[in-house]
Image (spheres, grey):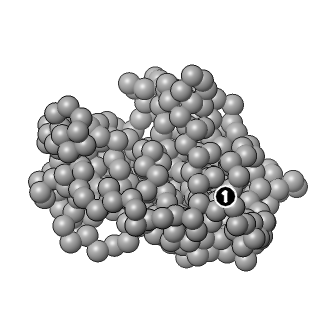
């Protein structure tokens, strides 16, 4: 067990792939970034955890599940996770991959937005985005699949601590990140493609706001890597980067300058310090202070699960959003 090590946020700036055959070149570049980071920082920092952004392998550029499945979807594990596993074995590190558009034979007509934690043994966990960025994303949520048996919130007990991950829009839902925290996560990893104007600069700077808030309310480290693609590479949005590491008191330990481009920032993860604070604190321990029974809103459904209608369509998602707004008292 490493009580103290360094985590690296590794931003990417790729052109958007149109076909799965183009993913390999992106994997090659991310492996090069990881290796350069480990070796280059070695005289100064022991980099053991490397995190890449959402859409680093592929983005949902087609407007139907059928086209995404035909052109970009891959099964997991695959040749790309094998390359990360080889790198993890060589350097004794863990890699949180950028996301894949995942196809699973167990769920025909369904695609997931998926990131993997990869170690020397291969894929250690697979997280499928629970809160797709609707109405634009046609990926399915595990929430909406009848009979879904896998743990939607895996937390892996590793030599680098207990690691949990969630993807981009998930982080605007405190319930999702709290689920990871209550499953024991000490390091909360954010794999994200957060676009302008909700980036790391005022007046909105949601990126910074939610990363710090989730760290504080869960007494956990946050390692958050954001997409750094330029507008010309991933239209119609520009991607502001600003990747950061935040400690359990909400302090930003390191942050990439906001703006597009490949960038790497590293910061220390002090597990011994985190565990000591979790053990000794009486005040500001929002996990042990939670009065869960009084919060009844989670006992009723809000966004409809979709009645098993797959493949997903944009029109179908918008209909569900309308129904969800009616349930919350918003306009239909």
Q: Residue at x 38, y 71 (%)?
A: 151
User: Which image quarter holds the N terminus?
Assistant: bottom right
Q: How many badges with numbers are in the image?
A: 1
Q: Secondary structure at mark 1?
A: loop
User: Which image quarter holds the C terminus?
Assistant: top left
User: Where 312 sits versus 125, above or below?
Assistant: above
- Front residue of 29/165: it is 165
Residue furthest to the right: 43
User: Where 155 sits versus 322, above or below?
Assistant: below
Other-residue count near label 1 (Cα within 10 Å), few / some / many at <14 / 14–19 / ≥20: some
Q: Residue at x 62, y 35 (%)?
A: 242
* Location of residue 163 by image quarter: bottom right
Q: Residue at x 45, y 45 (%)?
A: 172
- Residue 34 visible in this rendered orientation of the protein: no
Q: Which residue is mark 1?
A: 284
Residue 119: percent from left, percent from top: 58, 70
**In the image, 191: left or right of 250?**
left
Residue 126: percent from left, percent from top: 43, 65
User: Where 300 sits versus 331, above or below?
Assistant: below
Residue 245: percent from left, percent from top: 68, 48
- Residue 305 visible in this rendered orientation of the protein: yes
- Front residue of 5/275: it is 275
Residue 96: percent from left, percent from top: 55, 58
Q: Residue at x 47, y 39 (%)?
A: 193
* Location of residue 161 by image quarter: bottom right
- Front residue of 232/172: it is 172
Residue furthest to the front: 294
């Amino acid at each position: 067990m490493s009580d103290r090590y360094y985590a690296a946020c590794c931003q990417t700036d790729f052109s958007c792939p149109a076909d799965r055959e183009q993913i390999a070149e992106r994997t090659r570049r991310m492996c090069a970034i990881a290796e350069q980071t480990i070796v280059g920082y070695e005289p100064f920092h022991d980099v053991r955890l490397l995190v890449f952004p959402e859409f680093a392998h592929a983005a949902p550029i087609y407007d139907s599940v059928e086209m995404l499945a035909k052109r970009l979807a891959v099964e997991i594990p695959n040749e790309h996770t094998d390359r990360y596993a080889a790198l993890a074995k060589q350097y004794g590190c863990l890699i949180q991959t950028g996301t894949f558009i995942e196809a699973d034979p167990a769920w025909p007509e369904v695609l997931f937005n998926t990131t993997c934690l990869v170690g020397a043994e291969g894929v250690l966990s697979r997280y499928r985005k629970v809160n797709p960025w609707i109405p634009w994303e046609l990926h399915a949520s595990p929430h909406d699949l009848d009979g879904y048996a896998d743990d939607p919130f895996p937390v892996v007990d590793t030599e680098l601590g207990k690691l949990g991950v969630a993807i981009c829009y998930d982080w605007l839902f405190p319930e999702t990140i709290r689920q990871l925290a209550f499953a024991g996560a000490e390091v909360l990893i954010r794999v994200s493609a957060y676009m302008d104007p909700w980036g790391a600069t005022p007046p909105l700077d949601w990126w910074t706001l939610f990363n710090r808030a989730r760290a504080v309310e869960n007494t956990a480290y946050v390692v958050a890597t954001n997409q750094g693609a330029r507008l010309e590479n991933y239209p119609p949005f520009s991607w502001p980067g600003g990747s950061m590491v935040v400690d359990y008191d909400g302090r930003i330990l390191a942050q990439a300058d906001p703006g597009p481009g490949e960038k790497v920032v590293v910061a220390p993860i002090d597990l011994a310090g985190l565990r000591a604070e979790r053990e000794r604190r009486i005040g500001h321990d929002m996990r042990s202070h939670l009065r869960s029974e009084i919060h009844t809103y989670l006992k009723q459904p809000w966004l409809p699960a979709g009645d098993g209608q797959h493949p997903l369509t944009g029109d179908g998602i918008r209909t569900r959003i309308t129904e969800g707004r009616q349930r919350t008292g918003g306009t239909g």
